[in-house]
């Protein structure tokens, strides 16, 4: 995993462009509703790229370490963080919403997961999305992030929840 | 019903999608894959290893892929046409076998392969440690051992014993349970460390520390040990390229220099230069006569004892017997200025795991303590060398559980020790005063334990901490370290026992003494940051 975004032509499979801007490994991708690419990285930022000009449109910063991204159907972008260390323990796993045109955060952060947020994915059927976390849960949400339901992976044999790495 | 219908043989990472509608699939590091419809659980599909990613395939009526740690991509479908094909049925059978084999493997022990893979102990010279106190496992002629990097060499700290691997500790199941002999500040202990596949080694290490009341300072080492033992790479809080370390991981480091949390008991455990002690014994023996002259047998015993005590890397396995200790006491009536080799040997016996245990169970313990008491009452006679080695021995009484508990639980013994310390506190030698300061710090550390090892300090002990600390704070002009330890001692007492200590702090005027101490030292420039901040913290505790 390096820090570059590589764009390949879908037909010819050739490398068209290499986009630099992240300072640490990139761990997630998504698309905005208007066709821009969003990348999330361990450097604590998400970057919105215009793939026609290969330029950075916005850098969404201030995340606690690893960022996963999801473009939402309402035009906003949702980002999650894997958390930072507080007193030697991981904490502050946040879900945030951003306005892509302004590059500004919309509303407050949501911090209802109890472990690093490892993935975020759209659930078209309810017009919302789901986040999965090291706390062993997948949380189904409306497009505003409001919790519809929490689903639990079965506990491991020692009783601890497994890290849900992807959803 | 999702059934596996096809297999690929390489792993890929992908962007994440869920299926259309309400179907959601999630994968976890314990290999569990869950399929949901909305928030309702539809199906649980365990995998043989950690599932890194899952992906719904659009326009397939709900097929999805899982990518797991074993490098295999598995495609699942609920379409009977797909999963009833012969290749699919075959694939499913293999999958079921892989899953149950993986479950079995969890219960098996560290294999011969794993031991063979560990670096050979005899080749450790070629593998210098990268940091002080780093722990690594080695293959010592077919046994897996753990060793710690200390001042330029690998010191063996214990065996990784036991063939069983998975098991339970206190009713909680772990994928790996390792019975380990480990030398802790409280002596040699047989402990069980449990951890799970995919678990952050720091979580497992912290749990081990909490369960066994070990010093927090061991966190990094134990985590290193788990990582080395289980062959894991970086903890699963996120994959990263090797050039960047996660912020979270790097913050799990040993606590800063000053804190009221117990760091374990201080002990004077430096090994004297080889042959120095024995040389002195022989030299002094030359001028002894009659009963005081050591027999050949005693000289032999002393020689072998000294060899054992000097060989720190084998403390875990070497023996110190009652005969050895009796031989040391054969010097007890030597001239006062020739007694320090005897006390120095006791100093080392106290930190030797078997030595301290043996000493704690024989009357010779009282003999040596009473001898020190007698000498301390004849103050002028107690030469500095003897006073110093004797007081170091007293400090070392705390290091090993058995010896510490034996002394502290015996009213007569403990009172005798306190009397000695109370007499030595303002000794002319600053090193003796430092030893006294260290003694009361160790005594205060007893209050930091709870549970299995908790022992209530007697009134005389609590009083002794405050009385000696206040004298040291008032009169120590030389050694900042002495002041530091005295501060930590009263701070620790107050921190752990709270308002119970008010009677002592007022009896010894602690708050005004602290105030005066601040005054005396803060302008000299001789006190560093850490001590000054400690002084401030303690002053706050005693307003």
Image (spheres, rainbow, N blue to C red):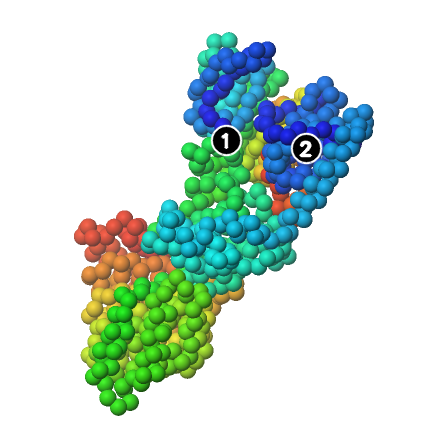
Whether residue B421 can be seen here: no
Q: Which secondary structure, mark 1? A: loop
Closest to the observer, B82 or A156: B82
**Chain ID, mark 2:** A
As drawn, B19 above or below B151: above
The percent position of residue B93, horizontal first and vertical second, equals 75, 37
The percent position of residue B250, horizontal first and vertical second, equals 43, 41
Closest to the observer, A79 or B166: B166
The residue that disc 1 covers is A66
The residue that disc 2 covers is A149
Classed neighbour count for the residue bearing mark 1: other residues with Cα under 10 Å, few (<14), some (14–19), many (≥20): many
**Chain ID, mark 1:** A
Residue sitting at x 27%, y 72%:
B277
As measured in the structure, the alpha-carbon distance from the residue carrying label 2 to the one carrying label 1 is 24 Å
Dot 2 or dot 1: first in sequence order is 1
Closest to the observer, B118 or A3: B118
Q: Are marks 2 and 1 on the same chain?
A: yes
Closest to the observer, B22 or B307: B307
Whether residue B482 can be seen here: yes
Residue sitting at x 61%, y 25%:
B16
User: Left of B38 or right of it: where is A17?
Assistant: left
Classed neighbour count for the residue bearing mark 2: other residues with Cα under 10 Å, few (<14), some (14–19), many (≥20): some
Please identify the residue farthest to the bottom as the structure is shown.
Answer: B290
Residue sitting at x 58%, y 54%:
B177
Mark 2 or 1, which is nearer the eye?
A: 1
The percent position of residue B427, horizontal first and vertical second, equals 22, 71
The percent position of residue B399, horizontal first and vertical second, equals 40, 66
The quadrant holding residue B5 is: top right
């Amino acid at each position: 995993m390096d820090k570059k975004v590589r764009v390949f032509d879908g037909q010819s499979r050739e490398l068209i462009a290499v986009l630099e801007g992240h300072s640490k490994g990139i761990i997630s991708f998504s698309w905005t509703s208007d066709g821009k690419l969003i990348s999330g990285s361990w450097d604590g930022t998400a970057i919105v790229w215009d793939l026609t000009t290969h330029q950075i449109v916005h850098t969404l910063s201030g995340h606690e370490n690893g960022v996963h991204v999801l473009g939402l159907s309402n035009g906003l972008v949702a980002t999650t963080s894997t958390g930072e260390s507080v007193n030697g323990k991981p904490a502050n796993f946040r879900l945030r919403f951003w306005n892509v045109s302004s590059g500004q955060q919309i509303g407050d952060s949501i911090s209802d997961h109890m472990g690093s947020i490892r993935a975020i994915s759209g659930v078209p059927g309810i017009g919302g999305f789901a986040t999965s976390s090291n706390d062993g849960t997948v949380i189904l949400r409306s497009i505003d992030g409001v919790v519809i339901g929490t689903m639990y992976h079965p506990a491991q044999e020692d009783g601890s929840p497994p890290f849900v790495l992807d959803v | 019903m999702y059934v596996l219908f096809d297999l690929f043989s390489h792993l890929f990472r992908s962007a994440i999608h869920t299926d259309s509608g309400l179907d959601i699939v999630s994968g976890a590091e314990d290999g569990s894959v869950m399929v949901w419809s909305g928030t309702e659980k539809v199906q649980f599909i365990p995998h043989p290893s950690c599932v890194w990613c899952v992906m719904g395939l659009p326009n397939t009526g709900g097929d999805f892929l899982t990518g797991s740690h074993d490098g295999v991509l598995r495609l699942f479908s609920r379409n009977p046409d797909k999963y009833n094909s012969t290749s699919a049925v075959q694939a499913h059978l293999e999958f079921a076998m892989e899953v149950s084999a993986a479950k079995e493997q969890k219960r098996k022990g560290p294999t011969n392969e794993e031991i063979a893979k560990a670096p050979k102990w005899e080749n450790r010279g070629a593998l210098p440690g990268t940091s002080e106190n780093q722990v690594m496992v080695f293959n010592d002629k077919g046994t897996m051992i753990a060793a710690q990097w200390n001042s330029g060499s690998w010191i063996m700290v214990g065996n990784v014993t036991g063939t069983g691997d998975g098991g339970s500790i206190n009713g909680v199941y772990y994928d790996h349970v390792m019975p380990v002999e480990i030398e802790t500040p409280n002596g040699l202990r047989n402990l069980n460390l449990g951890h799970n596949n995919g678990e952050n080694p720091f979580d497992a290490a912290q749990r081990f520390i909490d369960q066994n009341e070990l010093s927090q300072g061991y966190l990094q080492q134990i985590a290193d040990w788990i990582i080395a033992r289980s062959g894991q790479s970086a903890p699963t809080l996120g994959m990263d390229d090797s050039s960047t370390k996660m912020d979270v991981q790097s913050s799990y480091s040993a606590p800063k220099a000053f804190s009221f949390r117990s760091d374990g008991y201080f002990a004077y455990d430096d090994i004297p230069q080889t042959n120095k002690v024995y040389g002195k014994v022989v030299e002094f023996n030359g001028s002894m006569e009659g009963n005081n002259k050591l027999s050949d047998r005693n000289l032999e015993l002393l020689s072998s004892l000294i060899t054992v005590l000097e060989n720190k890397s084998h403390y875990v396995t070497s023996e110190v017997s009652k005969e050895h200790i009796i031989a040391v006491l054969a010097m007890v009536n030597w001239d006062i200025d020739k007694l320090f080799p005897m006390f120095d040997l006791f100093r080392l016996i106290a930190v030797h795991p078997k030595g301290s245990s043996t000493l704690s169970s024989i009357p010779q313990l009282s003999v040596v303590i009473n001898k020190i008491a007698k000498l301390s009452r004849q103050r002028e006679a107690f030469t500095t060398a003897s006073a110093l080695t004797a007081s170091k021995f007293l400090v070392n009484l705390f290091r090993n559980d058995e010896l510490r508990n034996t002394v502290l639980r015996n009213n007569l013994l403990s009172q005798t020790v306190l009397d000695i310390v109370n007499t030595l506190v303002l000794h002319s030698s600053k090193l003796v005063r430092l030893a006294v300061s260290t003694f009361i710090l160790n005594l205060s550390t007893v209050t930091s334990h709870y549970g299995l090892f908790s022992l209530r300090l007697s009134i005389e002990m609590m009083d002794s901490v405050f009385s000696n600390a206040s004298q040291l704070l008032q009169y120590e002009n030389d050694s900042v370290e002495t002041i530091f330890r005295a501060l930590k001692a009263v701070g620790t007492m107050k921190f752990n026992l709270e308002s119970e200590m008010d009677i002592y702090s007022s009896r010894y005027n602690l708050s005004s003494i602290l105030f005066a101490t601040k005054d005396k030292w803060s302008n000299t420039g001789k006190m560093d940051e850490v001590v000054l901040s400690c002084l401030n913290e303690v002053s706050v505790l005693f307003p």
